[in-house]
Image (spheres, helix red, strand yellow):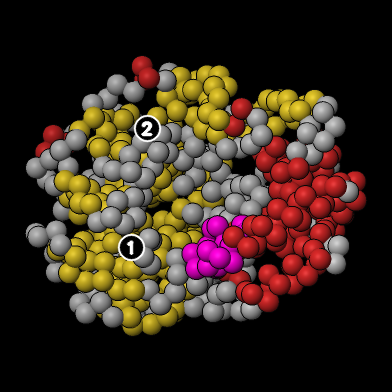
Amino acid sequence: MEINQLEHFKCLLEKGKPLDALLPLFLYVKKANLIENFSDTESTNKAQNLLNIAFENCGSDYLTTRKKLCDIIRKTRDRDQLDCALWVLFLFGDYSTLLESRNFLTKFPELDFYSGFSDYVASLLSLAHSVSRQPYLGKTPVGNTQFETRMASGRVCFSRTPKNNDVPLINNGRKIDLGRSMFSVNYDEVTESIILSDTSQDKVIAVDRKSLKIIHELKCPEPGVRGLAIHPILRRGFVNSEFGNSMFSFDLDNFKIRKRITGFSIRPERIRIDLKTDTLVTGNLGLYRMLPSEDIHYVQRWKSSSEDKVSDGKTLTVVNAITEKVEKTLPVGRRPTAVGISENYIVGGNFCDNTVHIFQRNTLDKPPCVGKVQVFPDVNFNFSLQDKISGAQVLVPLNLRAIMVEGIAIVEKRNWLLVAGFEGSILSIIDLTTGLIVDAIPVREGPMDVIINPQATLAFVSCHEAGEVSVVCLNKLREICRLQVGPKPMDPWLSNGMLITPHGEGFTMYTNNELEFLRDI
């Protein structure tokens, strides 16, 4: 099939139809470079050579090429084709046409793009300018703290100025290097083992607490291992297959698959569990992209999924841990990467909308309280590019907003929802009843998730870009120290005073002894 496909592209070129081959070849090469085992090296190289020929031939009659690409942008209903057309205009350096395309009426709703089609194209254009390489855009105050505003790869980020980063850094945790990237972690007190989801090998692994050696490994039957939860009483674990649109239950003692649970939407990711009611909740991310072709590998995984048709994200799925069946689907916003469940609430936090949907569990059929997490103002600026086709200077207006919802923790004792704001370096505090912002606490760069201690006095915020965990005192509403953990930390777990943080190389563990200084806070 792969050879026939490449021969077809070659045949189109030989027949003088480079435009018909250009976008399919571009998409093929994109997939080959992003998706493991999509293509062998020889085929990838052959496709790249054919793509180079198609580019050269299309460039020799660029007026025809430009018209065809513009028609595709206006008329196509295939998102991959739309993104490829935008990228090809970009690679030709036709910035003037891209700028004009911001006003095209496409066949896709505006909400299919992070902040609308116009800014979607402008973010792509920003990649051609030095403005995309960590430029300094100014300072933004939040309370008494000054934040530096920077832009990178078409996105805006806020981080504290150096003089506002003066809390002590603790570096006495034990880092366990497994040579693998971990996403989620739980602790099984029965077997005294650390259970982790291994995203690099699509496995669930168990590490003995005392020897710190791997004692069990479970290969997930479908790709995209992400969220993980365990039910120690039922002796069951649950892991999401993001690219299979499914969840698998497994036996905690023998590490064998029990059941494939279906009924999810596209890309189920994080899992949270309420042990008192045997209830799981997961968020379904959908296929939202920040830039053209950004998530092409997710799209491919979805298209090859074993489930033929699933709805596109914007939902939470509630699962019964005993029956191992989906019980309810709750509508939320775009890309609900953050999920939480407590005695009285289920919450979804929406990455693409900067909103949280707060459901009361006794009235799930009623509309939720929707809170807006908008700590920072939108950033508006213009940048100039020289069009490579005409040589003219084009002025590109760009509006950017920071992603402020990545992970959440429900704190019923205080009637709060804690929200980790990835691009804002902020932990937002939301009132559970009104959805309004109570306070905003500066933390380290890239807050990914947050967990609280049983007394609801401390919050531990994993900060993906900093490689640290920010420890926040909830009584004083400020960061009190930082814990060094490892590269790209993800979702932490706190059990019996032991903090375990998975990261890009394994996990780091702080025990009661290392965290003794926090006991009286």
Judged by depth in the image, the label closer to the viewer, 1 or 2, is 1
Q: Is residue 262 left or right of residue 392?
A: left
Question: In terms of secondary structure, where does tag 1 sit?
Answer: strand
Circle 1: residue type: Ser
**Can you give x and y, in whole percent of width and height, for residue 53 in the image?**
74, 55
Labelled disc at residue 61: none
The residue sitting at 61% across, 27% down in the picture is 130
**Can you give x and y, in whole percent of width and height, for residue 326 in the image?**
47, 76
Circle 2: residue type: Val
**Earlier sequence position, callout 1 versus callout 2:** 1
Check disc 1 and report the residue beneath it. 197
* Tag count: 2
Instruction: Pick out the residue farthest to the front.
Output: 14
Check disc 2 and report the residue beneath it. 443
The quarter of the picture where the C terminus appears is: top left
Does 297 appear above or below 309? above
Specify few, some or many for label 1: CA neighbours under 10 Å numbering under 14, 14-19, or 20 or more.
Answer: many
Q: Is residue 331 visible?
A: no
The quarter of the picture where the N terminus appears is: bottom right
The residue sitting at 63% across, 47% down in the picture is 291
